[in-house]
């Protein structure tokens, strides 16, 4: 299936219970999202103590050739420091092998936002980051476009449609024949019982 790609949509919701790295002042968290060679940076969320909220969506356009190398999504939570652009808070990795495989087979797969553990530098856990994922192959998008094109072609043909009256008459005929069959059954049962 060369030429077929996919779209990976990532919804970065929030993080809670994460480590506060600033000695002075309020934390200002942001997330670096890595998927293969692609990297996005979230907006800065001023967190209250150990909670940050982003509600941001990121879209990764992935050609089929990248799927073999696409093993995981990495979320690196950073905290802006006074004069630097980031103190490491923690990271989380979501493995994509099964998601991409099933998305390819179905055409699309969506995983509702769920919490994932945040791993610190010493490989311990502190807090969770909540993320949702949707993977859609361009093949399913192409199928949808084909359906739309087919519907447009049918509309262009301008075949005369049945009038509403003929539809009502056909319905009435059906109901009448159905009621006659039911009446005959009742008569037959009465005769059989007598």
Image (cartoon, rainbow, N blue to C red):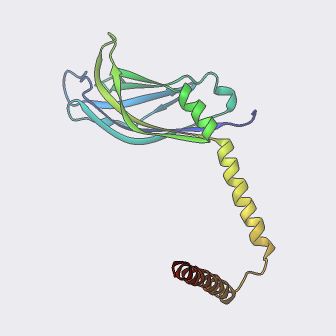
Across and down, in percent, residue 135 comes to 55, 38
Nearest the viewer among 57 and 133 is: 133
Camera-side residue: 160 or 8? 160
Q: Is residue 140 left or right of residue 128?
A: right
Q: Residue at x 56, y 84 (%)?
A: 187
- Furthest toward the top, the residue is 122
Name the residue at 64% across, 83% down.
177
Residue 43 rendering spot, x and y as whole percentages:
39, 38
| The one of 139 and 58 positioned closer to us in this rendering | 139
Rendered residue at 60%/83% (across/down): 184
* Residue 176 left/right relative to 78: right
Q: Quadrant of residue 60?
A: top right
**Is 86 left, or right, of 165 in this rendering?**
left
Rendered residue at 32%/9% (across/down):
122
Whether residue 87 can be seen here: no
Measuring from the top left, give residue 40's x and y in whole percent.
49, 32
């Amino acid at each position: 299936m060369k030429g077929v790609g996919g779209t990976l949509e990532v919804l970065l919701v929030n993080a809670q219970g994460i480590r506060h790295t600033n000695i002075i002042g309020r934390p200002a968290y942001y997330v670096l999202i890595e998927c293969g060679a692609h990297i996005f940076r979230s907006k800065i969320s001023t967190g209250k103590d150990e909670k940050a909220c982003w509600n941001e969506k990121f879209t990764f356009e992935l050609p089929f050739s990248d799927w073999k190398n696409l093993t995981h999504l990495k979320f690196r939570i950073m905290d802006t420091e006074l004069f630097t652009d980031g103190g490491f808070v923690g990271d989380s990795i979501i493995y994509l092998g099964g998601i991409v495989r099933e998305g390819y087979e179905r055409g699309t797969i969506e995983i509702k936002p769920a919490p994932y553990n945040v791993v610190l530098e010493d490989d311990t856990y502190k807090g969770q980051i909540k993320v949702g994922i949707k993977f859609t192959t361009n093949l399913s998008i192409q199928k949808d476009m084909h359906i739309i094109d087919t519907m447009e072609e049918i509309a262009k043909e301008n075949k005369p449609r049945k009038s509403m009256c003929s539809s009502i008459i056909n319905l009435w005929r059906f109901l009448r024949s159905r009621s006659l069959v039911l009446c005959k059954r009742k008569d037959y049962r009465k005769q059989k019982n007598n």
